[in-house]
């Protein structure tokens, strides 16, 4: 190996060590949590658009609470999954939770942002467009994964 290559490799190694030291193990873990939390949002979008209540249930904490606008709260993973199962039988949605800020506090995380939803009723072909804002509260599970513990949203614009 030439002297020039040794100097280059040593400089690259020094830079990598310096970056890791600056980030620290805690910041690297936080970055991994942020990525995992955003993946829950992406998986939620995919399951919702596929009409897959079972996949949605896999994203939920056992003791989750859903707080829809103008409706009573729905408590428990099974009840929330059943709600989506019934919804998907009659509605074909086009849905997107857009990314937003993530805040971490120990085993809890908060993710909020805007959303859009278009609903086509399967039987009557009626279309409804909704937009608003959501707040997910996620709970870190004992296996290190993140599940949705609370979902609350508003509906700012509803167009028939």
Image (spheres, rainbow, N blue to C red):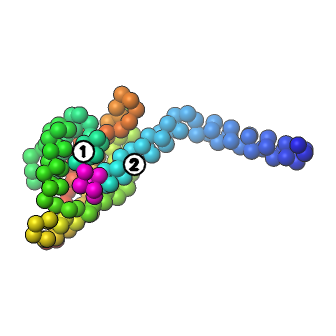
User: In screen coordinates, is 102 left or right of 160?
Assistant: right
Residue 134 visible: no
Residue linked to disc 2: 38
Give the residues in magenta: 47-52
**x 88%, y 48%: residue:** 4
Q: Main secondary structure of the magenta part?
A: helix
Which numbered disc, 1 or 2, marks the residue that appears first in the sequence?
Answer: 2
Residue linked to disc 1: 54
Quarter of the rendering occupied by the N terminus = top right
Q: Residue furthest right?
A: 3
In three-dimensional space, the C-alpha distance between marks 1 and 2, rounded to whole angstroms, equals 20 Å
Locate residue 114: give its quadrant: bottom left
Q: Residues within 10 Å of mark 2 (few under 14, many from 20)?
A: some
Locate residue 127: give its quadrant: bottom left
Q: Position of residue 122 (x, y in %)?
A: 14, 65
**x 49%, y 42%: residue:** 31
User: In screen coordinates, is 132 left or right of 86?
Assistant: right
Q: Position of residue 128 (x, y in %)?
A: 16, 68
Q: Residues within 10 Å of mark 1 (few under 14, many from 20)?
A: few
């Amino acid at each position: 190996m030439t002297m020039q290559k040794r100097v280059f490799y040593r400089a690259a190694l020094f830079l990598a060590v310096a970056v890791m030291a600056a980030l620290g193990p805690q910041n690297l873990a936080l970055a991994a949590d942020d990525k995992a939390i955003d993946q829950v949002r992406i998986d939620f979008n995919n399951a919702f658009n596929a009409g897959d209540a079972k996949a949605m249930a896999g994203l939920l904490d056992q003791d989750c609470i859903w707080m829809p606008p103008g409706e009573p709260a729905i408590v428990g993973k099974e009840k929330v999954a059943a709600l989506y199962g019934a919804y998907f039988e009659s509605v074909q949605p086009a849905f997107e939770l857009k990314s937003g800020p993530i805040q971490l506090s120990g085993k809890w995380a908060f993710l909020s942002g805007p959303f859009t939803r278009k609903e086509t009723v399967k039987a009557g072909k009626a279309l409804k467009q909704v937009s608003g804002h959501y707040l997910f509260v996620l709970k870190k599970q004992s296996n290190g994964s993140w599940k949705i513990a609370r979902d609350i949203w508003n509906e700012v614009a509803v167009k028939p």
